Image (cartoon, helix red, strand yellow):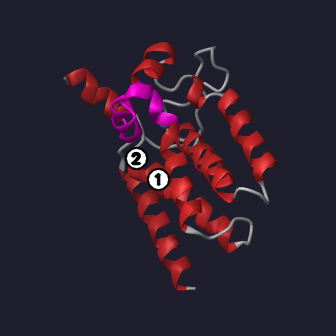
Amino acid sequence: MKTSQASILKIMMAPTHLVFGVTTAFGLSHLGLLEASVPVFAAASLGSLLPDIDHPGSVVGRRLWLVSIPVSMIFGHRGITHSLIAVVAMSAAIAWQIGAQSWIVALAIGYLTHLIGDWLTPSGVPFLWPNRRKFSSPIGFKTNSMAEMVCLVAMIAADAYGLRS
Ligand SMILES: [Zn+2]
């Protein structure tokens, strides 16, 4: 039990990923680069949680455990779903669907914000997977730290401000 709690604590909080994904989509829609609609924001939300499908204890992993358990057993947490392969696939999806299916673009953007978020934590991301070397930002923050809380509150405040204007 202790081990699973510890491994859950290592992943960035789902609300932070969610708010980062939605805030990015919201910002892009404010700039006229992304459609502002419920499917777009729902897709950005889902995308922001999707990479952690490789962790059965994550929000998305608990709901999609039938997919999550095998993915986690084969690739491990922060494996292929957090790699350059995933970045290229999501970037290709954006390039392919821009101006067409906004929700796919939003899903891919949400996904990429998740990887940026994990890159900002000391655990880092294995961009060169299957090489296990993890890359992390020199100016990041620990998961579940005060810094993460401050970022979360700042993004919510920015969203609230954006909704007013
Ligand atoms: Zn992750």
Q: Is residue 26 left or right of residue 17?
A: right
Residue 53 percent location from the top left of the image: 46, 32
Classed neighbour count for the residue bearing mark 2: other residues with Cα under 10 Å, few (<14), some (14–19), many (≥20): some
> Vertical placement of 100 versus 137: above or below?
below
Which residue lies under the disc numbered 2? 14
Which residue is pictured at 55% across the width and 46% down the height? Answer: 47
Name the disc covering residue 18, or none.
1
Q: Is residue 33 above or below residue 133?
A: below
Of residues 61 and 131, which is closer to you in this image? 61
- Chief secondary structure of the magenta span? helix
Residue at the spot 29% in from the left edge and 28% down from the top edge: 6
Q: CA distance from mark 1 to mark 2?
A: 6 Å
Q: Secondary structure at mark 1?
A: helix
Q: Which residues are magenta?
A: 51-68
**Disc number for residue 145:** none
Residue at 58%, 39% in the rendered image: 115
**Dividing the image into 4 quarters, which one contains the C terminus?**
bottom right
For this rendering, which residue is in front, 53 or 19?
Answer: 53
The answer to whether the residue bearing label 2 lies less than 8 angstroms from the nearest atom of ligand 1 is no
Bin the neighbour count of mark 1 within 10 Å (Cα to Cα): few under 14, some 14-19, many 20 and up.
Answer: many
Which amino acid lies under the numbered mark 1 shown in the image of this protein?
Leu
Q: Residue 134: where, in percent of width, then height?
A: 58, 24
**Could you tell me if the residues under marks 1 and 2 are in contact, i.e. CB atoms within 8 Å?**
yes
Label 1 within 8 A of ligand 1 by Cβ: no
Outermost left residue: 1
Is residue 153 within the magenta segment? Answer: no
